[in-house]
Amino acid sequence: RTVLFANSVLLECARQLLHDPSEFQCTMLVAVVGLERLFWLQVGDGTIIVRRRDGFFPIDCTPISAVGNVVSAVGDAAISRRFLCGLQSSNYVTGVVACSDGASERLISRDHKQVAGRLESLLDQLSRGRLKTVALQQFLSDPIVWTGTTGDDKSIAMLSLASAALTPPLQTTAQET
């Protein structure tokens, strides 16, 4: 239903602005972390990376329709049949990052096995409550960082446990007097 709702919003925007609906397409990446499971959904390109205590791991959600560089997007007429979703354990999840393909170009290796130190730094700042919106905007618009890329859109959505939640609780021992 979420995908259909997003699709209907884009179609309505196209109608109101008197444009062809094909001009209103976008990637949709969703991650919902629960106590036991992480739900993910993807329409279009982009990357979802999960940070666990022992490193970063991509969610393998390469679009089935990405053959020949044809990728589904929210706004496609047949969108209800072209999305990927799944569940995985949320054990030891400390953060999730969803990146558009433009941001993934510089932040995640092509084989999705390595993330840039800058992405790790941004997520660490977020977990400590120190990530400023301005710093993220400056990073995403810094021409030095993005020189040599395709110039595609650059979007990042991050969630992280607070750093206090990442630290094991203090253990105290009770003594009888």
Image (cartoon, rainbow, N blue to C red):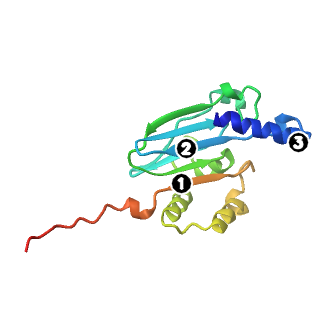
| For the residues bearing labels 3 and 2, Cβ distance under 8 angstroms | no
Q: The residue under label 1 is which amino acid type?
A: Leu
- Helix, strand or loop under label 3: helix
The residue that appears at 39% across and 52% down in the rendered structure is: 53
Q: The residue under label 2 is which amino acid type?
A: Ala
Q: Is residue 102 left or right of residue 41?
A: right
For residue 107, the mark is none
The residue that appears at 51% across and 48% down in the rendered structure is: 114
| For the residues bearing labels 2 and 1, Cβ distance under 8 angstroms | yes
Spatial separation of the CA atoms under disc 2 and disc 1: 9 Å
In the image shown, does 114 or 153 lie closer to the viewer? Answer: 153
User: How many residues crowd around disc 3 within 10 Å: few (fewer than 14), some, or many (20 or more)?
Assistant: few
Between discs 2 and 1, the one toward the N terminus: 2
Residue picked out by circle 1 = 159
Residue picked out by circle 2 = 31
Residue picked out by circle 3 = 16
Q: The residue under label 3 is which amino acid type?
A: Gln
Between discs 3 and 2, the one toward the N terminus: 3
In the image shown, does 168 or 145 lie closer to the viewer? Answer: 168
Whole-percent x, y for residue 65 in the image: 67, 27
The residue that appears at 42% across and 44% down in the rendered structure is: 90
Whole-percent x, y for residue 142 in the image: 70, 63
Spatial separation of the CA atoms under disc 3 and disc 1: 34 Å
Q: Is residue 10 left or right of residue 128?
A: right
User: How many residues crowd around disc 1 within 10 Å: few (fewer than 14), some, or many (20 or more)?
Assistant: some
